[in-house]
Image: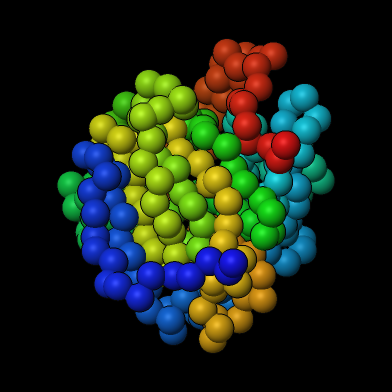
Amino acid sequence: MNHQLSLLPRQKQHLLSGAVHIPDWLSLEEQQQLLERCRDWAKPPAGLYSPQMPDGKPLSVRVMCLGWHWYPYRYSRTRDDYDALPCKPFPDELQALAQRALEDTLPQYAGRQMDAAVLNFYAPDAKLGMHQDKSESEQVRAEGSPTVSISLGDACLFRFGNSESRSGPHQDIELQSGDLFVLGGAARMAYHGVLKLHPGTAPAALGIRAGRLNLNMRETGFDDDTFDDVVKDFAQAFEGTVIKDLYKE
């Protein structure tokens, strides 16, 4: 049976202090405009690619970055794990979009300067296991600087947990095209992941035939002058470890 989206109005909800979900935050026209920009950013050079975990297993999502290039478990200005190309710049339009999102969800963080975006493309069978976003600087994480996530395309089942353990307790919510999810403050280090997609649920007029795009914006806390020493220490701390369940089984 095909998954059916609810016809009932969906309300803004605070899942935890600092975790806010706003359904239908972007209008269809805004989604179409953002999708076109994402398609432009995803083109070569430095476009979508398939990252690998340190043990060689691939993520099931395809990824591209703006501002800073993310790959497990670090950032770089170049795509060091793939083709060494420079990361595309973080555009002013995304800075404005992130500020609008913070004003609508966690206004105490409005004014934080986002400097990186990770664009994830989920094919219909892709998933993303429970994980924490912890590649950013210690100060950024300690201050609870939010991550701002926007969904485009097919709906997904999103699992939101806590900051102590990936095993639970959990809350499962459906993220649909145009939804906003912001994770900051006390919830900044909460585990979260995507369990599955609901194929065929994207708005027909959006123009995505299959799959889901997730645009996630964040503040890294790094600058070019101090970055090398900071990321070297971070990488050494995680040497030999594997973030479980990020890759496709």
Residue occupying image coordinates x 71% and y 46%: 60
Residue occupying image coordinates x 42% and y 57%: 174
Along the line of sight, which residue is nearer the eye, 140 or 223? Answer: 140
Query: Which quadrant of the structure image shows residue 237?
Result: top right
**Quadrant of the frame with the N terminus:** bottom right
**Residue 236: horizontal and vertical position, in percent?**
62, 14
Query: Which quadrant of the structure image shows residue 202?
Result: bottom right
Residue occupying image coordinates x 63% and y 32%: 245
**Residue 109: horizontal and vertical position, in percent?**
24, 47
With respect to residue 234, does 48 lie above or below?
below
Q: Is residue 52 visible?
A: no
In the current view of this chain or complex, which residue is farthest to the front?
Answer: 1
Q: Is residue 168 visible?
A: yes
In the current view of this chain or complex, which residue is farthest to the left?
Answer: 108
**Quadrant of the frame with the C terminus:** top right
- Residue 145 is left or right of residue 85, and the answer is left
**What colour scheme governs how the chains and residues are painted in the rendered image of this protein?**
rainbow
Query: Which quadrant of the structure image shows residue 76?
Result: top right
With respect to residue 101, does 246 lie above or below?
above
Along the line of sight, which residue is nearer the eye, 31 or 10? Answer: 10
**Residue 190: horizontal and vertical position, in percent?**
38, 32
With respect to residue 198, does 229 lie above or below?
above
Residue occupying image coordinates x 66% and y 70%: 210
Numbered label tally? 0
**Residue 97: horizontal and vertical position, in percent?**
37, 65
